[in-house]
Amino acid sequence: MDSVHLHLLITHVPVLATIFSFLVFVWGMIQSDKKYYHLAMVGFIAAGILSIVALQSGEGAEEAVEHLAGVSESVIHTHQESAEVTNWIAILLGVASIGGFLIEKYKPSLTKAYMVIILLLGLVSSGSFTYTAYLGGQVRHSEIRTQSAANQTEQGTESEEHEEGELP
């Protein structure tokens, strides 16, 4: 398995784990049931760890696809920058979730307030992962690119052809 396969395989896991864990967390709030909080926080911790793996595998994937026709370095760069921010948010949410278990055990009076913090971090993390995944899809799926990104890719492809000595 090469870095592209690893990246494509791994990147979906923290995205989906965060979104599903967020929904489980919300359900736990609605039901006032700690078992759902606990399940969601374990999911957030796992997503934070897997986010690191996904980010690290992105470098190799970038090197493998950056010279392919129709792939824009600016689209890759935008995806990479978003992934770096998302990674830190996921790590923060994972650490906050570990803190949630500790707060519940040692300071139960603070649990409700702390769960609101985790809820907000889960919402931000879910949104950030969704946006980063959307940008990642644009790397190879030109049909979902914005018009300006699609134009940059076309211009980049045309300039590469001119550099090789071909006529426009």
Image (cartoon, rainbow, N blue to C red):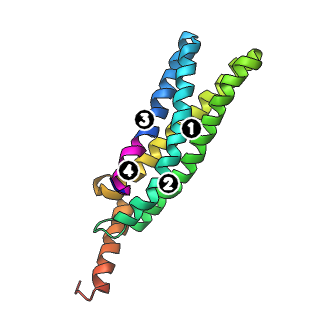
Q: Residue furthest bottom?
A: 165
Residue 9 colored magenta? yes
Whole-number angstrom distance, CA of label 4 to CA of label 2: 10 Å
Residue that numbered label 4 is attached to: 6
- In the rendered view, would you say 165 is above or below 30? below
Do the residues bearing badges 4 and 2 touch, measured as CB atoms within 8 Å? Answer: no
Q: Which residues are magenta?
A: 3-12
Of circles 2 and 3, which is in front? 2
Residue type at mark 2: give it.
Gln
Q: Which residue is mark 1?
A: 124
**Marks 4, 1: nearer the viewer:** 4
Whether residue 145 can be seen here? no
- Residue 148 image point, x, y percent: 39, 63
Secondary element type, mark 3: helix
Q: Amino acid at mark 3?
A: Leu
Q: Secondary structure at mark 4?
A: helix
Q: Which numbered disc, 4 or 3, marks the residue that appears first in the sequence?
A: 4
Q: Amino acid at mark 1?
A: Val
Q: State which quarter of the image contains the C terminus.
A: bottom left
What residue sits right under mark 3 in the picture? 16
Q: CA distance from mark 3 to mark 1?
A: 14 Å
